[in-house]
Image (tube, rainbow, N blue to C red):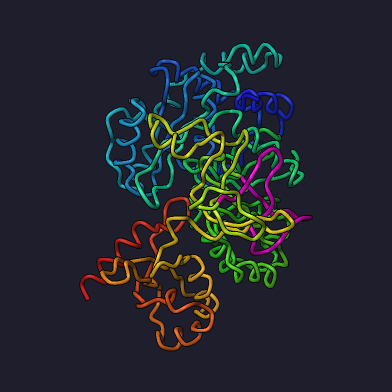
Amino acid sequence: MLLHQQFVRMAKKYEKKLAIVDRTLNRRVTYKKALIGSLLIAKKFQKYDEGFVGIMLPNSAGAVLAILGTLMSGRIPVMINYSTGAAANCEFAQKKCAFKTIITSKTLLEKINCPKIEGMVFLEDIMKSMSLFDKIKAALKAALPVDLLLKSIHGGNEDDTLLILFTSGSEKDPKGVQLTHKNISQNYNALVNAFSFSSEDVFLANLPYFHVFGQTANLWVPFCTGMTIVTYANPLDFKTICDIVREEKATIMAGTPTFFWGYLRSSKPGDFDTVRIMLSGADKCPDALRAGFIDKHNKVLLEAYGTTETSPAITVNTESHNRPGSVGRPIDGIQVITENYETGERCQVGEIGKILVKGDNVMKGYFDDFEQTSLSLRHGWYDTGDMGYMDADGYLWHVGRLKRFLKIGGEMVSLIKVEDVLEKVLPPDVECCVVEVPDAIRGARIIAAVTQQVDEKDILSKISGLLPNIAMPSKFVLIPEMPKLGSGKIDFKTITERVRDIVQKR
């Protein structure tokens, strides 16, 4: 399935239905208007170089139409993260993928204080340049029968690159992930089956489109099904989002634990009455967060697991098959195994190993990076770099990145496990991130970064029976606000650097 062509089919089928409720700019766009708008933009984009076109836009009707128009014109969107270091990210993407044009917004640049980079084209100027004749031509084309309309826009095949997304860079420099139409179509088909999605659903679309979670969950799944999406540009505007969910009667929400904590604290009883699916991903979902939604809203927060390289879904918990604490069972059409990180042998039930994935959801490869692609893809299996184990019923239990394991005195220690134990004894409003710092004698030692001052002796006393001595934090370091990526993930790279700087100065 070519995803932009599937959008055309849905747009023709549901012409009068709302496609986009843009709560950032207070616009309501029907499927018919969205089709005409994307055709208008596609025509304008044909003057740009073939190949890649950068897109740096917040969630809005304009962002959606720009992505669709890029694909319809035969170009490939390169999604650029504007949440931090926008100018550097633009230049990095241009250099990495060898393109010039970046579609962005004057309003966005002003808001994030980003200078204009060579090659930037403003969406506001593109829209102003559209004449009445342009609009009439696009409307006439949109009125064509589906078969003729599909022939008038770019085609291709399922193995063509749909878009380029950059990995989060939480541990190292970002890599350009090439996802194909087939990759995200696989996720679409599996997720529709898992959650019984339908055209009647209303999907809150506030996850950034420069992140794979936002692309699949907040764009392609709803548009390929004929849903209405409710876009909002700032997922951290927790109170407003709670109001939007209530007012627009959203039925599906997806987000990171960071975002869901904000919604839980800012919401009132009744805000989420219409929501039937709440899906948490990108980071481990704390038990306290799940309990909070049950207690306050009687809503079950379902946890899922995925990666940018897998489009993203690998495993999901569903309404009928939910094992809290696990990240769920593999979605339809893919294989998941765990492999011993030293011997390479397949793990037994309950044995922790590297998580490997095979299926049509796995990326084409990293753009212009044969070496890293070869390291990550072996005999059709994608090595996620994560550690976990399968239980007897086929549920996957994620225990952290392999890079978040360390050897101390010859023993493997999971930093995620240390965080889980600390979470049980720290006050609910204290965030914690455990990192390692070099140690001349033991090789490494464990430091716990916390957002508020804590009684170290009391905390260590409470966890002493829950962790082996080698896994006990040697210090607690205060970081009032945990750095996070634009996707909502914890920025381990920055936190580790800060902690090491603090420790070295003591």
Left or right of 229 in this view: 102 = left
In this view of the protein, which residue sits in the foreground, 51 or 411?
A: 411
User: Vertical placement of 17 versus 385: above or below?
Assistant: above
Q: Position of residue 144 (x, y in %)?
A: 68, 13
User: Vertical placement of 294 versus 14: above or below?
Assistant: below
In this view, which residue lies farthest toward the right?
320
Can the viewer see residue 278 in this picture?
no
Residue 175, quarter of the rendered image: top left
At a point 46% along the width and 67% down the height, the residue shown is 413
At a point 40% along the width and 84% down the height, the residue shown is 456
How many tags in the picture? 0
Taking the magenta stretch, the answer to whether it contains residue 19 is no
In this view of the protein, which residue sits in the foreground, 375 or 289?
A: 375
In this view of the protein, which residue sits in the foreground, 170 or 56?
A: 170
Q: Position of residue 88 (x, y in %)?
A: 29, 41
At a point 30% along the width and 47% down the height, the residue shown is 113
Q: Position of residue 244 (x, y in %)?
A: 61, 54
Residue 458, quarter of the rendered image: bottom left
Left or right of 278 in this view: 55 = left
Left or right of 282 in this view: 404 = left
Taking the magenta stretch, the answer to whether it contains residue 324 is yes
Left or right of 268 in this view: 129 = left
Q: Position of residue 53 (x, y in %)?
A: 41, 26
Can the viewer see residue 436 in this picture?
yes
The N terminus: image quadrant:
top right
Q: What range of the chain is rendered magenta? A: 314-339
At a point 62% along the width and 59% down the height, the residue shown is 397
The C terminus: image quadrant:
bottom left
Residue 290, quarter of the rendered image: bottom right
